[in-house]
Amino acid sequence: MNPTMTQRELQRVLVIGASGMLGTPVTAALIAQGFTVSALARKANSTVAGAREVVGDVFDRASLDAAMRDVDAVYINLGAAPTDRERDKLTEREGIATIIAAAKDAKVRRLAMISPMAKAYEGVDGYHWWGMAVKQAAERAVIESGVPYTVFRASSFFENLRGGMRRGDAISVMGRKWKPQRFVSGKDFGALVARALAAPGSANRVLYAQGQEALSSRALAERYIAARTSEKLELQAAPLGVMKFVGFFSRPLGNVVRLMEALDAYDEPFAAQETWDEFGAPSESVEQYATRA
């Protein structure tokens, strides 16, 4: 579970997306686990304390070549920007392609990435959104790259409660089907990534990051609000139909609505037992997250 540095196949990790909502806890966990971590940043002074900052861009092959020099593994934490369009140059498409090419030339020993479980809803019941198709293709590209890989397929995260779901003093719940998801904290997810990359036997594997409980978005929000006694919050319902109409006039909102359509309807299976047995189960509840974050 925790090999010494001399036993590890991987020691030096480049994190792409280290300063993001989920990249930050992963980077912190890797550092705590004893990895030597570099963080790719588009501008200086924007990464996690303890990581060596490397200024570069996923679309700039020369900067990736420099960043991957003497690196054992690359961890990829990329997502679409709210304003992205399918015809744009995308981090999860052109960026992933550039990362893979640089990793192969640098003879990187492992490509690791986060990938949402909900992308499996693409093509189901007539649902189609280019953003989900891009996420499917990104995971497939890493798996088929020829570089040993570890893909972390993840449920949704508690961090959304103070990210996309937060609207001032309200927690917004979009949709009405509210299919249960196994929400997990970024802290537990980061610990999983660090343990898996430190252990033998994680190459060419898909590992699942899911929380202990299956909760609807509404139940999650209600429990968070009840536990978050440091501030007064309220629950705000946002019908998908209304938000979809408004989204026609706002690309960022339109992209969020298409994502929420999938999350609202996707029947998330429980698939993490093997991952828990081998690398440990998550421990943080929504109440613990509410009082910590």
Image (tube, rainbow, N blue to C red):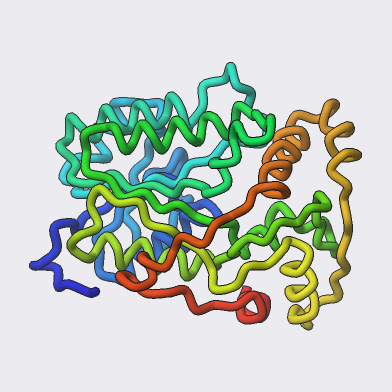
Disc tally is 0
Query: Which residue shows up at 71% across the image and 52% down it?
Result: 164
Counting from the top left corner in percent of width and height, residue 261 is at 73, 42
Query: Which residue shows up at 37% across the image and 40% down it?
Result: 55
Counting from the top left corner in percent of width and height, residue 270 is at 51, 62
Quadrant of res 287 = bottom right
Counting from the top left corner in percent of width and height, residue 79 is at 53, 40
Quadrant of res 235 = bottom right
Q: Residue furthest front?
A: 125
From this view, report whether residue 208 is shown above or below residue 87.
below
Counting from the top left corner in percent of width and height, residue 155 is at 55, 56
> On the rendered image, what quadrant is the C terminus found in?
bottom right
Residue 131 or 14: which is nearer the viewer?
A: 131
From this view, report whether residue 107 is shown above or below residue 25.
above
Q: Residue furthest top?
A: 87
Query: Which residue shows up at 85% across the image and 26% down it?
Result: 249
The answer to whether 177 appears left or right of 265 in the picture is: right
Quadrant of res 161 = bottom right
> On the rendered image, what quadrant is the N terminus found in?
bottom left
From this view, report whether residue 112 is shown above or below residue 26.
above
The answer to whether 180 appears left or right of 284 in the picture is: right
